[in-house]
Image: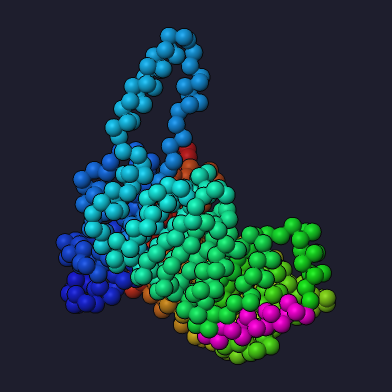
């Protein structure tokens, strides 16, 4: 095959599906063939046009044409704070008179200009738009003046995002505002204050995200509980869960609950007031989501409210994400009673235990395990032997013991990702060859030293090696080549490469972009002739001795 362009059009489309928006913009400028593919209807519908300013002036014709062609639109309106402060700071009386005349002329001129609301209204409803996704970030009253009851005129709309910002929020005298649309399936709302004046009639809704406030939306949750498949909540207080738990969501597949950190008094009061009725309510809530596959819980006591209930009913949950939790070790062990659990992520959590023994987990069906920013250790014994993907933050100075346990007991591991916050021991990689199925190895922040690589045996199975935010020199790269003779992909992202030979007594370091340095790439290709190499955002340190 001469080049990638010889692939069929449909295959190239599938490949470009894996690119994010920035990568697609880069691919657009590669060649005419790629430009024509990425400009087809399929990819055009995935692009998002963003307009962000105060909208004091009407949009240009070019902007109007762009809006008319796009399918995904994001509008960010910055409220104009005016210049009263600068005007009050005027010095002389003559300057003040000139400014007064200027203000009068400016106010007369404004009588014949559209307001930002009118410009935004003309943008969205002055012509027929083929929008599928609309995001508005502005004040509540401004947004209400723009949309009113005309959202139904955008026929193909299936996603709506309303992020209310600024200081213009509803007051007690504000009337009711009802947003109606028959086709909206995805809705995201951020309301920092009580939103009892706002309601939605969206019969096709399947995905809902609510940020900051929650109680005002209980009626909407109750109305759509049977059809919701995805629910994301960011709660101000964990007591709001008491309003959520009486509801049932029979078709829910993804649930995300986040709450703000607690004050010490609130924590104590909450643990003292929980009773049997609370546990029964939590049990009914969990049993009312039989189709739930993924659960994300962030904030103290969220897992305490639901963990044991999930275990008692042996829920068929497949993925569990715990962030910023503080729970007992016995509650952590409850995940062992989830028979279908395949993915488990624990991030920035604290688990309390009454003994000095390190916690163990027996999860024979677990496939993916991530343990990030967790200072205590977990014993990586045979109970985690089925895991094929492991992400881990290493804190302990004796990190070689943790890695030795992983190498001995997790023989099915295919992917290992290490976030290293301390220096790796020289013999940390000594038993790496015991993982005969390991294909991908990743290091973040601190790469192994030259001595550590010299102690690393030859690992034939590894095909992909990644370093991110590490410092490496030529000697280390040579040791890497020796350790992984079958390496097919090497990624050096945001690394510093000491490239020009051995260190001398006095050095002058000149940093250049290694990604664009052909000489650096050429030498790496000579070291790894059959390997694909990436140097994204890496720096090359050229060392020169000073006479």
Magenta span includes 169: no
Q: How many marks?
A: 0
Q: How is the image coloured?
A: rainbow
Q: Out of 308 and 175, give the one closest to the viewer.
A: 175
Q: Splitting the image into 4 quarters, where does residue 202 fall? A: bottom left
State whether residue 450 appears in this view.
no
- Visible residue check, residue 154: yes
The magenta region covers: 276-291
Q: Nearer the viewer, residue 390 or 299?
A: 299
Picture residue at 17% right of the left edge, 64% below the top: 36
Horizontally, residue 503 falls left or right of residue 184, namely: right
Residue 70: image location, x then y, percent: 26, 59
Q: Give the residue at x 33% y 22%.
A: 105
Q: Is residue 2 left or right of residue 477?
A: left
Does 278 lie within the magenta span?
yes
Residue 96's quadrant in the figure? Answer: top left
State whether the magenta stretch is mostly helix, strand or loop.
helix
Residue in view at x 68 percent, y 79 percent: 282
> Could you say which is closer to the camera, residue 90 or residue 416?
90
Tell me the quarter of the picture where residue 217 sits.
bottom right
Q: Position of residue 506 (x, y in %)?
A: 53, 43
Spot occupied by residue 31 in the image (x, y as percentages of width and height): 19, 61
Quarter in which the N terminus is drawn: bottom left
Left or right placement of residue 126 versus residue 320 in this view: left
Identity of the residue drawn at 77% across and 67% down: 270
Q: Is residue 305 above or below residue 111?
A: below
């Amino acid at each position: 095959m001469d080049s990638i362009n010889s692939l069929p059009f449909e295959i190239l489309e599938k490949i470009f599906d894996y690119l994010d928006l920035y990568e697609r913009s880069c691919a657009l400028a590669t060649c005419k063939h790629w430009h024509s593919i990425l400009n087809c209807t399929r990819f055009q519908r995935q692009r998002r046009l963003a307009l962000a300013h105060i909208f004091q002036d009407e949009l240009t014709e070019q902007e109007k044409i762009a809006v008319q062609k796009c399918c995904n639109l994001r509008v960010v309106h910055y409220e104009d704070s005016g210049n009263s402060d600068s005007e009050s700071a005027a010095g002389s009386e003559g300057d003040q008179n000139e400014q007064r005349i200027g203000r009068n002329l400016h106010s007369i001129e404004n009588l014949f200009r559209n307001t930002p609301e009118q410009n935004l209204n003309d943008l969205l409803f002055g012509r027929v738009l083929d929008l599928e996704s609309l995001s508005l970030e502005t004040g509540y009253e401004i947004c209400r003046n723009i949309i009113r009851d005309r959202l139904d005129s955008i026929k193909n709309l299936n996603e709506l995002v309303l992020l209310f910002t600024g200081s213009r929020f509803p007051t007690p005298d504000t009337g009711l505002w009802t947003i109606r649309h028959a086709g909206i399936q995805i809705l995201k709302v951020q309301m920092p204050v009580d939103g009892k004046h706002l309601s939605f009639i969206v019969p096709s809704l399947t995905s809902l995200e609510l940020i900051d406030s929650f109680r005002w939306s209980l009626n909407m949750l109750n109305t759509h509980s049977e059809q919701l498949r995805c629910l994301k909540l960011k709660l101000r207080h964990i007591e709001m869960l008491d309003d959520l738990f009486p509801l049932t969501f029979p078709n829910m597949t993804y649930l995300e609950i986040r709450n703000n950190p607690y004050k010490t008094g609130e924590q104590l009061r909450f643990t003292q007031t929980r009773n049997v009725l609370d546990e029964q309510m939590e049990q009914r809530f969990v049993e009312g989501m039989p189709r739930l596959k993924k659960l994300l819980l962030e904030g103290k006591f969220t897992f305490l409210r639901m963990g044991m209930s999930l275990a008692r009913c042996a829920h068929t949950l497949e993925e569990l994400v715990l962030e910023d939790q503080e729970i007992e070790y016995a509650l952590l062990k409850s995940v062992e009673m989830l028979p279908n659990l395949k993915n488990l992520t624990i991030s920035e959590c604290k688990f309390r235990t009454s003994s000095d023994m390190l916690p163990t987990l027996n999860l024979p069906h677990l496939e993916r395990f991530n343990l990030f920013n967790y200072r205590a250790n977990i014993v990586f014994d045979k109970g985690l032997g089925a895991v094929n993907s492991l992400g881990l933050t290493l804190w302990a100075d004796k990190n070689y013991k943790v890695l030795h346990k992983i190498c001995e007991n997790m023989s099915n591991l295919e992917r290992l990702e290490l976030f290293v916050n301390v220096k790796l021991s020289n013999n940390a990689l000594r038993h790496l060859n015991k993982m005969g199925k390991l294909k991908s190895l990743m290091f973040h922040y601190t790469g192994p030293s030259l001595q550590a690589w010299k102690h690393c045996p030859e690992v034939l199975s590894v095909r992909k090696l990644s370093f991110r935010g590490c410092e490496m020199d030529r000697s280390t790269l040579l040791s890497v080549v020796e350790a992984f003779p079958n390496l097919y992909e090497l990624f050096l992202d945001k690394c510093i490469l000491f490239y020009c030979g051995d260190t001398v007594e006095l050095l002058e370091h000149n940093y250049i972009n290694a990604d664009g340095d052909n000489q650096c790439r050429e030498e790496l290709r000579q070291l790894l002739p059959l390997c694909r190499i990436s140097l994204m955002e890496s720096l090359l340190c050229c060392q020169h001795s000073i006479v």
